[in-house]
Amino acid sequence: MQVEWQVAKTYEDILYYKAGGIAKIVINRPHKRNAFRPKTIVELYDAFCDVREDPKIGVVLLTGAGPHTDGKYAFCSGGDQSVRGKAGYLDETGVPRLNVLDLQRLIRSLPKVVIALVAGYAIGGGHVLHLICDLTIAAENAVFGQTGPKVGSFDGGFGASYLARIVGQKKAREIWFLCRQYSAAEALEMGLVNCVVPLEQLETEGVTWANEVLQKSPIAIRCLKAAFNADCDGQAGLQELAGNATLLYYMTEEGAEGKQAFLEKRPPDFQQYPWLP
Ligand SMILES: CC(C)(COP(=O)(O)OP(=O)(O)OC[C@H]1O[C@@H](n2cnc3c(N)ncnc32)[C@H](O)[C@@H]1OP(=O)(O)O)[C@@H](O)C(=O)NCCC(=O)NCCSC(=O)CCC(=O)c1ccccc1C(=O)O
């Protein structure tokens, strides 16, 4: 399936396209195996905010540019260690940041479906990025793993607890404690990815999945995503789920009656609405 991607906005570290109801966001630092610096995250955050505000977009494909000149592919290799300072990753003004955590929360709470397309390495913070996406499609050359304890880092948030929800406690501890690398086939076996396809079919497969999602009810999908999140995300997850309930209530005549009565300075007439079983 050929897609006519249109550039949605120009950035330095990422590429951002749209076509139909699909957005494609590409981490574009192949010379660093698509490691992210604070600027990369600021740009990713901006693009995901644009997706959130665009009512035509229902699905995002998140991927990495490649191959690099050495022929190797990467989805993302995590935080750029060359700009790591004493208290985080240094931005252009020297302020230390761990702003990937903001991006993780934005992707998770985005009321649209995010699909990671992983070719090559999804390592360290890059592995956590694919993990928090709603779905992951891996190319046959994909390689997954955490490196934190090897490079003096760890993600005790979604990177630990959500990983354990997906692959189980024993496997999650193995992944973090041993810092091994896992093939696409092994990732499929442990439920870390949804499917594995030949490299040259990766984007086509992503577009096929996206188009299938786009045939479905937007409100049903956003409520389901919030419901899946609520199971793991404590009060923030409940807030997200309940926000959808409020959205739906606002869309009812009953909800509108309360507002209308206030504006017309009269008592609300809720008696016309049934107390359903
Ligand atoms: C990905 C590799 C396994 C690929 O190996 P290989 O194919 O042999 O390529 P290399 O020759 O190693 O790399 C090519 C080229 O890219 C540069 N590079 C690769 N990865 C990085 C990186 N992460 N940062 C900077 N530069 C990178 C590499 O230096 C080479 O450059 P040359 O100039 O050509 O030499 C392998 O590259 C690899 O293992 N990479 C490192 C993976 C890693 O450890 N990532 C960091 C993990 S920690 C993290 O991601 C922090 C996440 C985070 O922000 C966070 C989140 C929540 C809580 C806390 C934190 C926190 O900040 O700690």
Image (cartoon, rainbow, N blue to C red):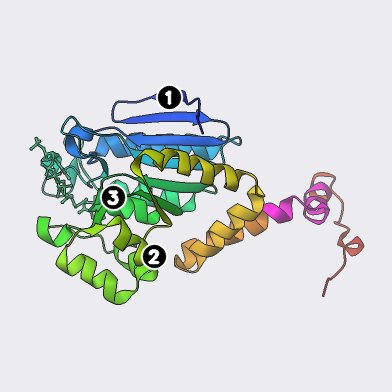
Residue shown at the point (41%, 52%) measured from the top left: 136
Q: Is residue 30 above or below residue 252?
A: above
What amino acid is at disc 2? Gly
Which residue is denoted by mark 1 in the rendering?
9
Which residues, given as a range, are shown in magenta? Answer: 247-260
Q: Is residue 101 left or right of 255 when viewed as pictured? A: left
Q: Is residue 222 above or below residue 5?
A: below
Viewer-side residue, 198 vs 16: 198
Which residue is denoted by mark 3 in the rendering?
142
Give x and y (percent) for residue 224: 58, 59
> Of the numbered discs in the image, which one, if any, rests on residue 191?
2
Viewer-side residue, 249 vs 20: 20
What amino acid is at disc 3? Ala
Residue shown at the point (31%, 44%) measured from the top left: 119
Give x and y (percent) for residue 267: 86, 56
Count of marks, rendered view = 3
Choose top left, top right, bottom left or bottom right for residue 182.
Answer: bottom left
- Precedes in sequence: disc 3 or disc 2: 3
Q: Quadrant of the C terminus?
A: bottom right
Main SS, magenta residues: helix
What amino acid is at disc 1? Lys
* Gap between marks 3 and 1 measured at Cα: 28 Å
Q: Residues within 10 Å of mark 1 (few under 14, many from 20)?
A: few
- Precedes in sequence: disc 3 or disc 1: 1
Dots 1 and 2: beta carbons under 8 Å?
A: no
Viewer-side residue, 267 vs 25: 25
Secondary structure of the residue carrying numbered label 2: loop
Choose top left, top right, bottom left or bottom right for residue 91.
Answer: top left
Q: Comparing marks 3 and 1, which lies closer to the viewer?
A: 3
